[in-house]
C-alpha cells in the first residue's frame, strides 16, 4: 500500500471493529468520529462526560444513534473503562480523547485490566508524502525518549509488524545517525551497527536493517550514489528509526509543516492498537490513524 486512500480500500467493512475512546468530550476527536462513520470505517464507544459529549455531537451534527456512550466524567476512570472495554473484547481499538497521554498509558499498563504484552510500547507514524511512491514510517517520535539498544530492537520490530500489515513483506529499516560510519563517540552509530547485525542473525525478524545511515542516504538514491554508499536500504528505506525523541519529533513536524505530508500514527506493542492523537493533529490525521489501527487489528485477528 502506498497511500491512505489505498488503506481505506483494504479495510474489511463487512464486520466493523469498535473503537473505545477515553474522555471523548473533544470536538476534534468527535469530528474525526463523524468522518469515520460517514465512510463506514468503524463503530465507536465513547467514554467520558456524557453531557459534554452530547453537546458537542449536537454542535457538529453527529447523531447519538450512531455511537454508544458510557458516562464517566472522571478522566482516570474514563481511561480505565475504555481500556477494560478493549481488554474484555467488547472493543478492539483504544483511542485517546481529551486527557493527558500519561493518564491513558497508566490504564494501558494496569496489571488487572491493562493491555500489556511484555513488548515495548512505541509510536509509529506513517507518512504519505507527495514526493515518494511509498509510505515512510517514522519511529519513535512520541513515546520513548532515549531508547537503549534493546529498546530500539523492540521499536523496530513493532514498526516492522505495522509495515507488514500494510503489505510490505520485508521492510527496509534505516537506523538514522549523523554519519554512515561507526564512531565510538557517537552512540547512535554503535547502536545502528549492532541492530544491523541483530537483523542479520534473526534477532529482528522479517526486516532488512542497515545503518548507520544519515537521513539523505536513507531516502535518496542519488545521495547514496554520490557518497558511494552501497546498501539494500540506502535510498530505499521504508522505516526510519530515530535515535531520540527530539530527532523524531522535529522530523515528524517538519514533514507535516514543510512537506504537506499526510500522516497517521498508532502505538503498537500492546494487545490492541492504540490511537494517541494530539490536539494539533488534523481531523484527517485522526481518521488516518483510526484506519491504520483498524487494519492492524484486522490483520492481527487473521
Image: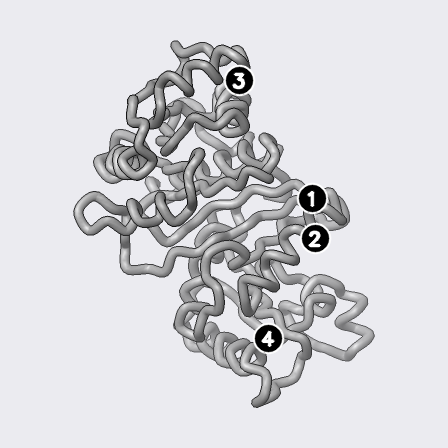
In the rendered image, which quarter contains the N terminus?
Answer: top right
Closer to viewer: mark 4 or mark 1? 1
- Circle 2 — which element? helix
The residue at the point 28 percent across, 47 percent down is: 115
Q: Earlier in the sequence, mark 4 or mark 1?
A: 4
Is residue 127 in view?
Answer: yes
Q: Where does the image place residue 242, in percent across and percent down from the top left?
A: 57, 65
Instruction: Please tell me how crowded label 1 is: few (under 14), some (14-19), or many (20+) other residues with Cα within 10 Å.
Output: some
Of label 1 and label 2, which has the lower sequence position? Answer: 2
Q: Which numbered tag is attached to residue 38? A: 3
The residue carrying pointer 2 sits among few (fewer than 14), some (14 to 19) or many (20 or more) residues within 10 Å by Cα, namely: few
The percent position of residue 186, horizontal first and vertical second, equals 59, 83
Q: Dividing the image into 4 quarters, which one contains the C terminus?
A: top left
Alpha carbon separation for disc pair 4 and 2: 22 Å
Give the SS element for disc 1: loop
Q: Is residue 36 visible?
A: no
Q: Is residue 100 left or right of residue 260?
A: left
Structural distance between the alpha carbons of marks 3 and 2: 30 Å
Res 240 → quadrant: bottom right
Residue marked by disc 1 = 261
At label 3, counting other C-alpha atoms closer than 10 Å, the crowd grade (few under 14, some 14-19, many 20 or more) is: few
Q: Viewed as shown, does residue 120 lie left or right of 239?
A: left
Check disc 4 and report the residue beneath it.
Answer: 211
The residue carrying mark 2 is: 254
Question: Is 124 positioned to the left or the right of 216 in the image?
Answer: left
Sequence-first tag of 3 and 1: 3
Amino acid at each position: 500500500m502506498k497511500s491512505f486512500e489505498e488503506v481505506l480500500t483494504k479495510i474489511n467493512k463487512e464486520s466493523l471493529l469498535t473503537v473505545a475512546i477515553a474522555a471523548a468530550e473533544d470536538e476534534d476527536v468527535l469530528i474525526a468520529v463523524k468522518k469515520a462513520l460517514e465512510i463506514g470505517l468503524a463503530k465507536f464507544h465513547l467514554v467520558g462526560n456524557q453531557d459534554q459529549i452530547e453537546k458537542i455531537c449536537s454542535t457538529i451534527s453527529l447523531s447519538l444513534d450512531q455511537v454508544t456512550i458510557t458516562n464517566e466524567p472522571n478522566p482516570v476512570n474514563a481511561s480505565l473503562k475504555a481500556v477494560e472495554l478493549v481488554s474484555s473484547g467488547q472493543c478492539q481499538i483504544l483511542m485517546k480523547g481529551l486527557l493527558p497521554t500519561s493518564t491513558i498509558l497508566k490504564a494501558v499498563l494496569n496489571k488487572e485490566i491493562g493491555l500489556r504484552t511484555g513488548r515495548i510500547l512505541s509510536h509509529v507514524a506513517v507518512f504519505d508524502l507527495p514526493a515518494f511512491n511509498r509510505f515512510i514510517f517514522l519511529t519513535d517520535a512520541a513515546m520513548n525518549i532515549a531508547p537503549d539498544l534493546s529498546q530500539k530492537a523492540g521499536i523496530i520490530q513493532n514498526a516492522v509488524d505495522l509495515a507488514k500489515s500494510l503489505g510490505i513483506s520485508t521492510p527496509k529499516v534505516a537506523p538514522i545517525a549523523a554519519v554512515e560510519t561507526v564512531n565510538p563517540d557517537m552512540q547512535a552509530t554503535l547502536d545502528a551497527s549492532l541492530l544491523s547485525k541483530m537483523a542479520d542473525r534473526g534477532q529482528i525478524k522479517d526486516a532488512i536493517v542497515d545503518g548507520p545511515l544519515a537521513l539523505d542516504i536513507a531516502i535518496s538514491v542519488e545521495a547514496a550514489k554520490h557518497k558511494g554508499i552501497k546498501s539494500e536500504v540506502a535510498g530505499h528505506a521504508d522505516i526510519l528509526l530515530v535515535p531520540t525523541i527530539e530527532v523524531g519529533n522535529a522530523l515528524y513536524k517538519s514533514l507535516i509543516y514543510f512537506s504537506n505530508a499526510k500522516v497517521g500514527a498508532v502505538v503498537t506493542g500492546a494487545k490492541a492498537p492504540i490511537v494517541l492523537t494530539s490536539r494539533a493533529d488534523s481531523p484527517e490525521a485522526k481518521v488516518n490513524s483510526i484506519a491504520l489501527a483498524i487494519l492492524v487489528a484486522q490483520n492481527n485477528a487473521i
